[in-house]
Image (cartoon, helix red, strand yellow):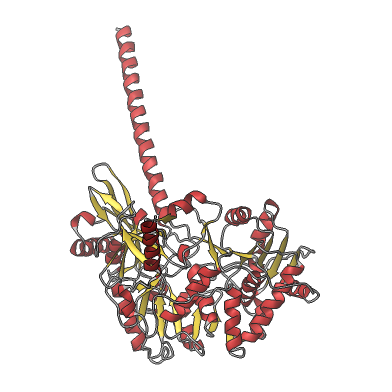
Amino acid sequence: MKKSKWNNDNKRKLRNKREVMPWEKFYPKGVTNDLAYPQNTMVGYLLDSVSRHPELVALEFYGSTYTYRELYERIRAAAASLKSQGVKCDDKVAMCMPNTPQALILFYAINMVGAIALIIHPLSGESEIERFLNESGVKFLLTLDLTYEKIHNIADKTPLEKIVVASAGDGLKNIKKFIYRFRKIGKTPKIELTDNIMTWNEFINYGYGYDGEIVHLRDKDDPAVILYSGGTSGDPKGIVLSNYNFNSLALSCHKMIEQSGEGESILAILPIFHGFGLGVCIHTTLGCGMRVVLVPQFNPKEFGKLISKYKVSIVCAVPTLFESLTKTKLSKKSLEYLKCAISGGDFMPSDLKNRVDKYFHDHGSSAEVRIGYGLTEASAAICVTPTGKYKEGSIGIPFPGTRVKIVKFTTHDEQSIGKMGELCISGPTVMMGYLNNLEETIQSLQTHEDGRVWLHTGDAASMDADGFIYFKQRIKRMIVSNGFNLYPSYIETVINSHPLVFTSTVIGIPDPKKMQVAKAYIVLNDGVKPTKEIEKSIKEHCQKNLAKYSLPSEYEFRSSLPKTLVGKVAYTKLEDGEKEVEEEKQLSKKDLKKLKKLEEQAKKILDKIAKIKK
């Protein structure tokens, strides 16, 4: 027994001893792997920032600005209004909003009263919104006037009791509020206001008469936010994240992005209903005293102009937006204020990174794209390339406090250095689980033999000796063809490097001999129409740059590709389309067989009739 006790004590000491990771040497000066993460709520983390610099500008929205003090006062007023409307601790409050001041104010107000924010994409379909509200039991919702009609149509089929309708003009202080419109979302409908359907201003007014307790202190591990996954590989799932998840993400991002801090600014073009947008562009930056320039409706053609106009020092975007930036005409010094650029949400090929870096330098910026990786299940970001330490094909090194390992597929066994396997993550940003989906939660969050809970990402990757991670492919997207593993993202990178190709997506389609083969869907550059000569040129380009076994067997040109609500290519829709085509082919084969049998039967009958006549 004494020996066993000694062994247990010794193991405990070893566990508590700080483990130095190989990637720590690439961290910014003074940053170690064992950060002291905030133990408070999200609004508490923001309040620390407010107390440090109350008069700095926190938000800018079409010329209107809010200092940190003003922002906090509005959050507190909205929290009082929530309490006056009966919102209690652990209630779920939904927001169906783009990037506007009202959305951010209510987001933190929800956290202040101890409720849970459920964030819905404003362009979600009615049936999706209905499912999200019923799944979570939401009774209170904030929506934009331009999306109200969808809410109105499904409200009676949900637990909804009260709806607040906001207008973009509510957040503007000058004449621009009269000309601002969300043209792509729709027209402003006529809204019949009742005691349970109120405008944003009416909602805020209700709080002024409330004299009860406003702040409900929650534990760091209590649920705070529910975000829905993009649905690229199935139906969107509700991802439950805690105060600790978001605060850990914010502190890690702040330490890894040296340019973040007081006096700096960020262009918040990524939407708040996306983990990257909410966690990195909003919570991280507000937590360290930056100015957040809110952009509610983004046009890729205006990307460069917005960076120049607002003199922002940091931008976070997905690869396709950075690619659109390189096609924008700007003056030589238009990006001189830009210090840092982070690419996430999807993998950025090295040739695109080189083009973007050159574009920055040609327009007065010393910034270089730093490639990151994350997923909503880990609060949106878990690694990023260190400043000036890019390795081709890498998505960077893990954030402080985040452990990453590569395991052999379908096992917990760690893969050798440089070998491909499934990427697994353990750390303070890993989700609590999926909303009302225990089966998926158990499948994704697995306790390994080291006693840690690891998030199985479903992504194929490898890691080198320095701890740099190399993303390969979503495991579900791997194509097994005649025994070979084909990686659509790599084939897409090759196709996209053709000068006439704007973008592409590759999926696997059935093949009678090889089980599966690759098929490429291609969108050409603006003004370029598909021809046999262009298809031949792309095929020759692929033959030159791809192994023979990974060459697409089919090339189909499209004017556009289906997208999820967060802007990623919905490759499952393409796969579903191919399944329908295959089913039609199979039906056609069955019909042909039936027809052949009928013809044979008819011939026999005719032969008998002929014999009788004779």
Q: Quadrant of the C terminus?
A: top left
Residue 44: x, y in percent?
60, 76
Please give left or right for residue 573 compared with residue 271 in the image.
left
Quarter-of-image position of residue 191: bottom right
Residue 61 in sight here: no
Q: Is residue 550 left or right of residue 447?
A: left
> Which residue appears at 33% of the width and 74% of the height?
20
Q: Decide which of 401, 390 is in the foreground and name it.
A: 401
Residue 501, horizontal then vertical, whole percent? 32, 67
Of all residues, the one furthest to the front in this rendering is 2
Percent across and percent down for residue 1 are: 39, 55
Closest to the observer, 477 or 150: 477
Q: How many marks?
A: 0
Q: Position of residue 230 (x, y in %)?
A: 48, 60
Report if residue 416 is visible in the image: yes
Seen from the viewer's position, the closer of residues 75 and 309 is 75
* Residue lying at 19% horizontally and 61% vertically, measured from the top left: 543
Pick whichever, 334 or 35, lies toward us. Answer: 35
Question: In which image quadrant can residue 233 be found?
Answer: bottom left
